[in-house]
Image (tube, grey):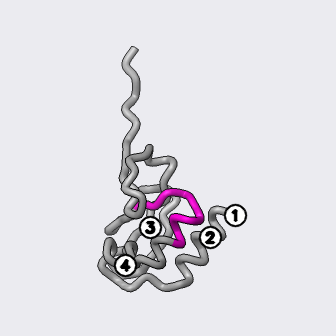
Amino acid sequence: MKTKKIPLRTCIVTKEKLPKRELLRIVRTPEGNIIIDESGKANGRGAYLKKDLLVFEKAKQTKALNRQLEVEVPDQIFEDLKNYVK
């Protein structure tokens, strides 16, 4: 029996390659909005973050998410990320 391939994605902060289910996708939509994509299928430019509070803090400090999405990420998104983990 053929085993199903598990898609791997890279966290933009830790640079770890992890299964897609273990990461959280943040998307800049074509309209320019920033959203948390729980389905992993939203249209737009995406960046993956490990589901860890420390990773979210480091992304905010280093502005890694801003560079990856090529736009200023509002603080509300980081608050939503913290609430998502809790």
> Considering only order in the chain, which callout, 4 or 2, is on the residue closer to the N terminus?
4
Q: CA distance from mark 1 to mark 4?
A: 23 Å
Residue type highlighted by circle 2: Lys
Relative to 68, say whether 50 is above or below.
above
> Considering only order in the chain, which callout, 1 or 3, is on the residue closer to the N terminus?
3
Give the residues in magenta. 48-57
At label 4, counting other C-alpha atoms closer than 10 Å, the crowd grade (few under 14, some 14-19, many 20 or more) is some
Residue type highlighted by circle 3: Ile
Label 3: which residue?
26
Residue 32, quarter of picture: bottom left
Label 1: which residue?
86
> Considering only order in the chain, which callout, 3 or 4, is on the residue closer to the N terminus?
3
Q: CA distance from mark 3 to mark 1?
A: 17 Å
Q: CA distance from mark 4 to mark 3?
A: 11 Å
Q: Secondary structure at mark 2?
A: helix
Percent position of residue 55, x then y? 51, 64
User: Which numbered circle lies on residue 66?
Assistant: 4
Which quadrant of the figure contains the N terminus? top left
Relative to 83, say whether 22 is above or below.
above
Relative to 72, say whether 25 is above or below.
above
Residue type highlighted by circle 1: Lys
